[in-house]
Image: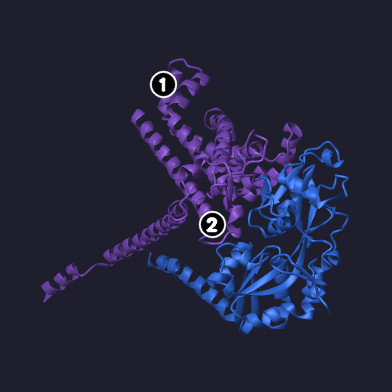
Chain colours: A blue, B purple
Amino acid sequence: MKKKWLYLLGLPALTLMLTACEFKQTGQSITAVGSSALQPLVEAAGDEFTKENSGEFINVQGGGSGTGLSQIQSGSVEIGNSDLYASQKSGIDASKLVDHKVAVVGVTPVINPKLKLTNLSIAELAKIFSGDITNWQQLGGPDQTIVVINRAQGSGTRDTFERWVMKGQTSMQAQEQDSTGMVRQIVASTPGAISYMAFPYVDKTIKTIKVDGVSPTSANVTTNKWQIWSYEHMYTNGQPTGLTKRFMAYVLSDKIQQKVVAEMGYIPVNDMKVSRTLKGKVAKINS
Amino acid sequence: MKNDEIRASLLKRSRATKNERFGKILTGLCIAIILTVVLAIFYFVASKGLATFFKDKVNLWKFLTGTVWNPGTTDAQGNPQVGALPMIVGSFGVTFLAAIVATPFAIGAAVFMTEISPKVGKKVLQPVIELLVGIPSVVYGFIGLSVVVPFVRRTFGGSGFGILSGTFVLFVMILPTVTSMTIDALNAVPRNYREASLALGATRWQTIYKVVLRASTSGIITAVVFGMSRAFGEALAVQMVIGNAMLLPSNLISPASTLTSVLTMGMGNSVMGTLSNNALWSLALLLLIMPLVFNLIIRRIAKKGAMHR
C-alpha cells in the first residue's frame, strides 16, 4: 500500500527531474513570438544559428502579429515578430520598442485556378473586397458568384492588403480564415474564390494575377512597382543585448539575408531600391 | 509499567490511522487544487469579459443583439461595433440542428443495441461507437472540409461553407456521445418493466415504444443535452467548415460563424487589454456560461425523471 503511494509521488518528481535536466542542457535560449508570415523565416534563421553556436537556442512561436507585439511589450519574450509597425496597433506603446526590419514580403491576390482571369486593376480589386462587384461576369469572366475569403481581423497580411488595395475603405463581412494555409486550400478547391496571401505561401494549387498589369514578383516589389508589400519587423524591448543582440545581427547578416531570406520567397531589405515610411511615403534609396 | 505501555500504544496513532490521515490530506489537496483552478479560470474570464461592459462601456443589450462585429472600429455614433448576435445565432443554429438530426439516429442505434440485437450491438457496434468518440476533432474538420463542403456545394449551391456543413460535421461528432448515453438510459430501465409488458401480450415493438422509451425519456433527453453541450463548445472542426463570416446567416448554406470560431481566429491578432481583446473575452464568458446552463437543464431533467420512478 505504502509503496504504491511512493510510485504515485515518484512519477511527477521524476518528470520534474527530467525536465530540469533538459533545461540544464539548453544553456542559453531566447524566444521569438508573433507573426505567422514571418515565422518560417525566423525558424530557419534560428536553426542555422544553433548549428553555428551549439548550446544557444532560438525558440520560435507563431500566434499572430498582435500576440508578438503584446508579448514583447509585456517583456515576456525577447523578440516580437510583426507584419505591422508597432504604432499601427492600438494598445501598444511603440516608443519603448526597437524596430528591426529584417525582410520585405509581398502580398498578392490569388484566385481559383479554374478562373481564366489574368489581370485586375486596383479599383476592381477594391470593389470585389468591398462587395460592389459580386459576379465574375462583371469583370469579363464566367457567370459565377465571387467567393471572397478574408484573413482574420488584425492579421498582418490582411492589414497590408487593405492598406494598399482598399485604401481606407472597409471591406465587407466575408468568410474569414485564421491561417494562410487554410486560405490556400479553400481558394484551391472553391470555384470562383478570391483571396490574398504573402509570396512565400504561393504554390501551384492557386493562381496569382497581375494587378494593373504588374506581375507579383520580388523584382517588382524592390522598385515599388508592385505596391502591396510590407516590412517584416522583429521588435525588441529596448536595445537588444547578449544573445538577442547576436541573433538580430545574425538575421541581418549577408549570409541569412542573401541565402535564406531570398530562398524562402521573402525579399532582403538590402535589395530594396526604395524605402517606404510608416505613412506610406516612398523614397528612392541611393546606393 | 505494563499499563503504561498499553496506554501509550492505545493513545499513539496506529499505522492505519496515519495512512488514513495521509489519504485524507492527499485527496483533500487534490480537490483544493482543482477547485482553485476552476475558480481562477472563472475569475479570469469573468474579469476580462466583463471589462467590455464596465471599462469600455459597451451596452450589454447591444452586445447581445448587435449584428456588426468589428471591434477595432466604431460606428457613426462612436460606439464600438461589438454585436455578437451573428455568432450567437450561428452557435445555437449548428448546435440545435445537429442535435435534431442526431437524436433519431442515436435512439434508433441504441434501441437496436439494447433491445433488438444486444449481441451484435456489443460485439460490433459498441467498438465502432467508441472509436468514433476517440477521433480527434481536427480529423472531423478535415474530412468536413474535403468531403462535406464540396458535397454541400454541389447539392445545395453556394460556396459549401455554412451552417449546413457545420451541422453535418457536428452530427457525426455528437452521435457517439448521444448514442452511448442513450444506451445507458435504456439499460437502466428495470427488466421487470419489459417482462410485465410482454406478459400482458404486447409485441416487442409495443414494449419498446410504449414502455422502454417512455420509461427512459429523461435519460434520453439528458443524453441529447449532453451532446448539445459538446456541439456548442466544439471549435476546430466547425471553424473549418462554417466559413467564419460574421454575418447573420440568411440561410443554411451561407457562410456563418460561431462563438468558438471567432475566438480561435481573433486571439492571436489582438492585444491584451484593448477592446478587441476584451470583446473576445466576453464571447469566452458566454461560452463558459452556456455549459453551466446546459448542466442545470440536465440536473432539472434528472430530478424530474427520478420523481417518476
What residue is shown with label 2? Answer: B277
User: Quarter holding the C terminus of chain A?
Assistant: bottom right
Query: As rendered, which of B5 and B15 lies closer to the eye?
Result: B15
CA distance separating discs 2 and 1: 61 Å
Query: As rendered, which of A5 and B296 lies closer to the eye?
Result: B296
Amino acid found under the numbered disc labelled 1: Ala
User: Residue B76, how many percent across, how many down?
Assistant: 57, 47
Lateral position of residue A135 relative to residue B198, left or right: right
Element at label 2: helix
Element at label 1: helix
Task: Tell if the residue under mark 2 belongs to the same chain as the one under mark 1.
Answer: yes
What residue is shown with label 1? Answer: B196
Residue A250's quadrant in the figure? bottom right
Mark before the other along the chain sequence, 2 or 1: 1
Marker count (numbered): 2
User: Quarter holding the N terminus of chain A?
Assistant: bottom left
Q: Give the chain letter at badge 1.
A: B
User: Residue B111, how many percent across, how many down?
Assistant: 54, 29
Residue B80 in view? yes
Residue A63 in view? no
- Give me the residue at 41% from left, 25% from top: B193
- Give me the residue at 65% from left, 82% from top: A245
- Give me the residue at 76% from left, 65% from top: A105
